[in-house]
Image (cartoon, rainbow, N blue to C red):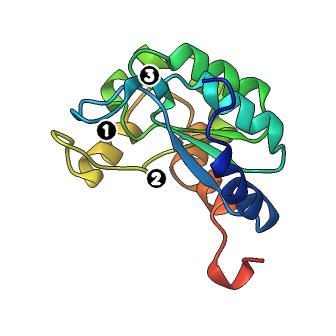
Amino acid sequence: EEGGLKQLNLMYEFAQDHDLPVIIHTGTSMFNNARNKYADPIFVDDVSVDFPKLKIIMAHMGRPNYVSTAFQLVRIRKNIIAEISSIPPKKLLDYLPRIEEIASKTIYGSDYGGPGIKSISQNLKEFLSISISDKAKEQIASKNAKSIFKPLSELK
């Protein structure tokens, strides 16, 4: 919507000033009260441009309807990070066949859980078995999160 949720600007400013990541959910929801009109990740673009040093984790990569938009935003915006927890590992390459292009900006499991989701350990095993490079798997499953989420002792 024009103008967006301007009241969130204070939170975005605080997070940007303190090097804290912000998770923004994208993609349609199965919950009855969810307002899916806000599911399109294109709305994250304005936040990214207005707060260029804010680390934005785009939860669920717009799944199921907006994955291509989410992918493009991760590619072009330095401060948008892909989060793939709602994409079943066995379907990941169907949704994101070019995931290796954004592996350095993708995290796994930071917004885990929901109805019908397998255990996190089972999902991780399935993720680690997909046909992408070991380097990409390490970045997505471990390395990237360590650079995004700081220990409490390092927070500003």
What's under tag 1, amino acid-wise?
Answer: Glu
The residue located at (55%, 49%) in the rendering is: 23
Query: Is 43 positioned to the left or the right of 10 in the image?
Result: left
The tag on residue 110 is: 2
Query: Which SS class for mark 3?
Result: helix
Left or right of 74, for residue 130? left
- Dot 1, how many residues are within 10 Å of its Cα: few (below 14), some (14-19), or many (20+)? few
> Which sits earlier in the primary sequence, circle 1 or circle 2?
2
Q: Is residue 64 left or right of residue 83?
A: left
Work out whether residue 132 or residue 13 is closer to the camera in this orientation and state it. Answer: 13
Residue marked by disc 3: 37
Does the residue at mark 3 contact the one at mark 1 (Cβ under 8 Å)? no
Q: Position of residue 26 (x, y in %)?
A: 48, 32
Which residue appears at 73% of the width and 79% of the height? 154
Residue 52, position in %: x, y?
Answer: 84, 43
Work out whether mark 2 precedes mark 3 in sequence or the reverse, and give the earlier one.
3
Front residue of 128 and 18: 18
Cα gap from disc 2 to disc 3, whole angstroms: 23 Å
Image-quadrant location for residue 29: top left
Quadrant including the N terminus? top right
Residue 86 locus on image (x, y percent): 36, 36
The structure residue drawn at horizontal position 60% and vertical position 38%, both measured from the top left corner, is 136
Name the amino acid type tagged 2: Ser
Q: Secondary structure at mark 2?
A: loop
Residue 22 rendering spot, x and y as whole percentages: 61, 53
Disc 2 crowd rating (10 Å Cα; few below 14, some 14-19, many 20+) is some
Point out the frontmost of discs 1 and 2.
2
Q: Tag 1, which secondary structure?
A: helix
Could you give the CA–CA distance between mark 1 and mark 2, rounded to whole angstroms? 16 Å
Q: How many marks?
A: 3
User: Which residue has dot 1 on it?
Assistant: 126
User: Alpha-carbon distance for marks 3 and 1?
Assistant: 31 Å
